[in-house]
Amino acid sequence: MEDFSPHTRFRFPDEPDAIELRAFTHGLQPATVPSMMEHFTEDWRRFGVDAWNKVPNHWAPDSDDTVGWWTLPTYLGDEFIAPLLGAPHGSCILQPHVHWTVQCLLSAPEVRDRGAEILLPDTAFPSVLHSVQQWDDLQSFRPQIVPSTEENRVHREALLNAIGPNTAMVALSHVGFTTGARLPTSFLQRVAERAHAHDALVLLDGYHAAGSMPVDVTALGCDLYVGGLLKEGCGSSGNTFLYIRNGLELTPRLTGWFGDAAPFEFRQSPEPHPDVRRRFLGGTTAVAPMYHAVEGVRILLDLGLDTVRAHSLRLTDLAIERVDSADLSLRSPRRPAARSAMILLEVPDAHKLTAHLKAQHIYTDSRQNEVVRMAPFLWNTEADVHTTFDHIEGALASGAYRHTSVSTSGPVT
Ligand SMILES: Cc1ncc(COP(=O)(O)O)c(C=O)c1O
């Protein structure tokens, strides 16, 4: 990516030597975000209530499309999320968080009608794993949770074998958030084939996949794909998305008047919106997050997801070389095809090593005090990877990092 100048595309922390390697938690801020937020405050001031119907199209200033706050969730779904997922026009919508979308799905009788079991691995993210267990009593779903392998990865054969006539939905993470392991397309296609043979749905959670690599929901064969824009997508919170396969009928009971067919008629009884994706709206949509939602996606699409992926692989290749030469153990997959944008390395006292690196303005994170996670991403260079590993090797050699105190300012690392 020789012609990519990250400093014109992104805004960096104040320290000039900062190396931000936590794209898996929150990406850097795109350079256009301050002006988009200024547009929000100005649209609110200038147009007031009428902004719901029409505001200038800041998202595509050169286009003839008109846009209003009312239509932004589907407009941005069509213009930015669909290309990110290789999805057709009319199939994607912005959502507030994955948790909400999963709850909506579980409330739809069309899911329950397909079977009594929701099948998922124990490595699924809590927004999915906990939601399924919480709906257990209400919809009389039985969560069928497949234990992971010793390496904490999805047990593929066990999962495939568990799909059967009682399966209503199979829910899988495209990339495992604790391992960085990416499920192969061929496996996901087999899951879809088997699930569809039993009239079950396939839901993929693509947080950590969408935005860091090309995704093609049609080729994957899934019915539903969720993910968020906070991390590799470089938006901020309040912006996730849902793709729904064309023709799939769902009438979530957890829906709101924004998902109604005639919201401003204020009828006594609800009527689902004819556009299925709109039924996943709840009450009044939060508008401000949509002003920064897709500024990172704009950069990703502009560069091309193939280019983004090639850059990410080059940097993680280099990181793995440094892991090997330092004689450290890699906890994430080694094969490029099985990798996501993050790598995990095993180190003693990982929390302290992360704190030590942070004091040098190198931002990684740690889990279970056993592994350091890092994702050298768009704005990082080979020099960033070398600097990071020079510090890691130095710290491990001297052991002095073990005296670093770990900040207790909050739970987020
Ligand atoms: C795989 C995965 N799914 C979902 C989420 C977040 O879900 P929500 O939007 O409900 O906060 C995360 C956040 O880290 C994640 O890693």
Image: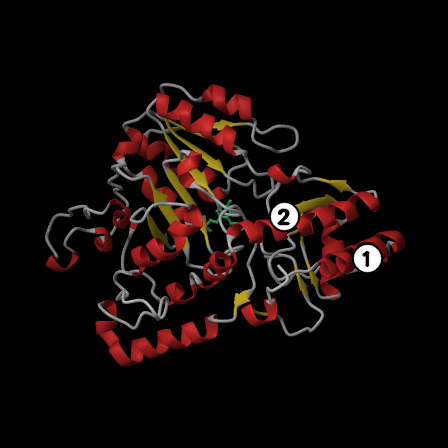
Task: Left or right? Give the position of 318 relative to 201.
Answer: right
Residue 30 spot, x, y in % from top left: 51, 67
On-image quarter of the N terminus? bottom right
Residue at 46%, 55% in the rendered image: 229
The answer to whether mark 1 is within 8 Å of ligand 1 is no
Q: Can residue 297 be seen in this view?
A: yes
Number of disc labels: 2
Residue 329 spot, x, y in % from top left: 77, 40
Q: Looking at this rendering, what residue extends furthest in the right direction?
A: 398
- Depth check: 307 or 217 in front? 307
Task: Left or right? Give the position of 21 relative to 390.
Answer: left
The chosen color scheme is secondary structure
The answer to whether the residues at label 2 and label 1 have Cβ atoms under 8 Å apart is no
Q: Looking at this rendering, what residue extends furthest in the front direction?
A: 3
Q: What's the residue type where badge 1 is placed?
A: Asp
- Depth check: 324 or 89 in front? 89
C-alpha span from label 2 to label 1: 19 Å
- Depth check: 217 or 200 in front? 217
Name the mark on residue 51. Answer: none
Residue at 40%, 77% in the rendered image: 38
Name the mark on residue 342. Answer: 2
Residue 247 spot, x, y in % from top left: 26, 37
Name the mark on residue 390. Answer: 1
Q: Tell which circle, 2 or 1, labels the residue nearer the N-terminal end.
A: 2
Q: What's the residue type where badge 2 is placed?
A: Met
Looking at the rendered structure, the secondary structure element under dot 1 is helix
Q: Is residue 143 visible?
A: no
**Position of 321 relative to 165 (above/below):** below
